[in-house]
Amino acid sequence: MTVGPSGANSDVANFYNGSGKVRVAGKIRDRWGGNLHNGYWHDEDDDASPEVATDRLTDLMIERLAPQAGQRVLDIGCGIGKPAARLLRGHPVDVVGITISESQVAQARAGAAEAGLADRATFEYADAQQMPFPDDSFDAAWALESMFHIPDRNRALAETARVLRPKSRLVIADFVLRGPISEDGLQAVQRICETFGVHTIGPLDDYLAQLASHGFTGPDVLDISDNVARTGNLLADAWEDVRGQLEENGNSDHVDALITATRDFSNTPEFGYVLVSTTLG
Ligand SMILES: C[S@@+](CC[C@H](N)C(=O)[O-])C[C@H]1O[C@@H](n2cnc3c(N)ncnc32)[C@H](O)[C@@H]1O
């Protein structure tokens, strides 16, 4: 079962360019930091800030990617480049990040230049479903909360396999649907899909089958649903704090919808979250 709208992904670009129904881009950056992904908390007593917890998730990705010196790493859906910068600071690799938001490309390039990483970091506007790279261009890749946005995930995985060299690692952080799905759960999932431009979400088994069909082997799955679950409520609290700014560009119904769908991330058990690490060939 796959839930969510299908077709073009211009809604995703609008969301990240800050030109959607509610202009969210950058509004909570001082509080959330530059990572556009979930936080990771060890347990209920862990009171790490979102900034620390989101860096932890990046660190889990880095650990599972196990990058080797000199590798060229593809960052599929790079956001504003904060995860790439963290990878680059700790490892002597080069990163090429792609995103379908022009605004993010500009921010990621500026951030890398400011951090003195521009010689090892390249950010480009590109769609993961049709990558502008020759075959066998990269030694490793990750997709940190980007695959769910992509209308044709199967095509994006085919493209990923094409541009990776044999034996490359691929690490994915993504949402999956967990059954059984209640009527309330289904409605919440649909609210999330509509509000956040989630085009593809389904059961883990479908995901693994798609990966296998493109030659990715030995998948290792880490279910961290409980560790990231706090993110939705914390993010919704942050939206509440900037409600005034959000309402300057969108009407209050749209802001209410954003906040409700954000809390749904925390309160919908059907919405699971996994890290999948695999190797090509
Ligand atoms: C939730 S953000 C995650 C950003 C970044 N990985 C991070 O963790 O900070 C999703 C990212 O996926 C990108 N994205 C969505 N659809 C894409 C597509 N079809 N091709 C490339 N990037 C895409 C978005 O532009 C955005 O940068």
Image (cartoon, rainbow, N blue to C red):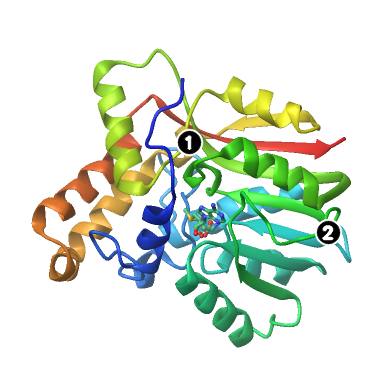
- The residue at the point 61 percent across, 28 percent down is 207
Does residue 148 appear in the picture of this structure?
Answer: yes
Q: Is residue 31 above or below residue 55?
A: below
Q: Is residue 231 above or below residue 121?
A: above
Residue receiving disc 1: 200
- The residue at the point 81 percent across, 59 percent down is 134
**Distance between the alpha carbons at the discs numbered 2 and 1:** 26 Å
Q: Position of residue 47 (x, y in %)?
A: 41, 51
Question: In the rendering, which numbered label is found on residue 93?
Answer: none
Q: Say which element carries label 2.
A: loop
Q: Residues within 10 Å of mark 1 (few under 14, many from 20)?
A: many
Residue receiving disc 2: 137
Q: Using residue 194 as the reference point, say whether residue 216 is left or right of it.
A: right
Q: Nearer the viewer, residue 200 or 255?
A: 200
Q: Residues within 10 Å of mark 2 (few under 14, many from 20)?
A: some
Residue occupying the far top of the picture: 180
Hey, what amino acid is under mark 2? Answer: Ser
Q: Position of residue 68 (x, y in %)?
A: 87, 58
Q: Say which element carries label 1.
A: loop
